[in-house]
């Protein structure tokens, strides 16, 4: 029997002169905005898969998976991504929202929470870092070089190897290789702009401006940022009324995809 696909809507919002695509699903009274990390190709083409993955949240929340702006400037720092995200949230007619940001999406999410506290209900930061240096900086440099050289296959393989646990990566290598054949010049250009934005990102001192409850989720085997940045973030959230920290072990940077209880953990925090 064919599995029933989760319903979703693909649309766009224009606010302050900027257009951003989004996927909407769920029927809950509360709003949850998901900000994905960087990807070689946009997640907007995976609406059914995303809606199915986050089905546990759809009874209590209407979920908006928000992409970056369609037309990116060549220099597009995280602060501008946060500003565009805040404008899009307002453009969607939303008021108090919860935000879940993964990886670079977490950097955008923490920036929104610090810059626009009036928009925030609760914040979830997954597999992210408020200070990018060392191995993380080297990895983003590798990715920008591959994107700049037009090496879609090398980029997909480097990205997959860093983001997923070794066993998952080995099982998925052929899928990454196949996906790389559909990568366009525009895809590589967007990826390059986003990757450059996270290089050298430094936001630890700004975290004291966040005043909503925060859940920080990381993994000790994260090969992009490691577990230390999650602990750093939690330690610097000095003005948040509630800070929860959870570290997985063995699910990798993409614990948001690979840890079986991840969505339920988010839901439990959001409903506390």
Image (cartoon, rainbow, N blue to C red):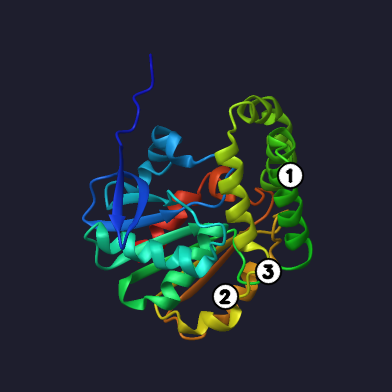
Residue 56: x %, y % from top left: 37, 45
Query: For the residue carrying disc 1, how many other residues have a C-alpha within 10 Å: few (<14), some (14-19), or many (20+)?
Result: some
Q: Residue at x 51, y 85 (%)?
A: 238
Q: Residue at x 57, y 75 (%)?
A: 234
List the single residue furthest toward the top: 1
How many callouts does the rendering have?
Answer: 3
Query: In the rendered image, which quarter is residue 181 located in?
Result: top right
Helix, strand or loop status at disc 2: helix
Per the rendering, the mark at residue 200 is 3
Helix, strand or loop status at disc 1: helix
Q: Are marks 3 and 2 in contact (CB under 8 Å)?
A: no
- Looking at the figure, which quarter contains the C terminus? bottom left
Q: CA distance from mark 3 to mark 2?
A: 20 Å
- Labels 2, 1: front one: 1
Q: Is residue 25 left or right of residue 113?
A: left
In front here: 190 or 163? 190
Query: For the residue carrying disc 3, how many other residues have a C-alpha within 10 Å: few (<14), some (14-19), or many (20+)?
Result: some
Q: Residue at x 53, y 62 (%)?
A: 76
Q: Which residue is mark 2?
A: 234
Q: Is residue 239 above or below residue 132?
A: below
Q: Is residue 129 left or right of residue 47?
A: right
Helix, strand or loop status at disc 3: loop
Q: Which residue is mark 1?
A: 146
Query: In the rendered image, which quarter is residue 89 located in?
Result: bottom left
Q: Are marks 2 and 1 in contact (CB under 8 Å)?
A: no
């Amino acid at each position: 029997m064919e599995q029933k696909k989760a319903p979703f809507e693909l649309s766009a919002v224009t606010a302050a002169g900027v257009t951003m695509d989004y996927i909407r699903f769920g029927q809950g009274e509360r709003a949850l905005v998901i900000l994905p990390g960087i990807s070689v190709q946009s997640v907007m083409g995976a609406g059914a898969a995303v809606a199915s993955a986050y089905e546990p949240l759809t009874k209590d929340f209407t979920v908006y998976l928000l992409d970056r702006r369609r037309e990116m400037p060549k220099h597009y720092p995280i602060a501008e991504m946060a500003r565009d995200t805040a404008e899009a949230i307002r453009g969607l007619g939303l008021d108090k929202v919860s935000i879940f940001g993964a990886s670079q999406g977490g950097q955008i999410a923490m920036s929104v929470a610090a810059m626009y506290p009036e928009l925030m209900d609760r914040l979830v930061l997954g597999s992210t870092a408020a200070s990018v240096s060392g191995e993380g900086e080297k990895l983003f440099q590798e990715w920008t070089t591959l994107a700049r050289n037009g090496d879609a296959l090398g980029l997909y393989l480097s990205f997959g190897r860093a983001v997923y646990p070794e066993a998952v990566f080995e099982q998925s290598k052929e899928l990454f290789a196949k996906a790389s054949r559909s990568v366009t010049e525009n895809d590589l250009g967007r990826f390059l702009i986003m990757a450059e934005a996270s290089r050298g990102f430094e936001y630890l001192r700004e975290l004291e401006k966040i005043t909503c409850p925060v859940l920080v989720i990381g993994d000790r085997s994260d090969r992009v940022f490691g577990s230390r940045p999650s602990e750093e973030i939690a330690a610097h959230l000095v003005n948040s009324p509630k800070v929860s920290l959870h570290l997985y072990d063995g699910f990798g940077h993409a614990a948001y995809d690979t840890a079986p209880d991840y969505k339920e953990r988010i839901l439990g925090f959001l409903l506390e």
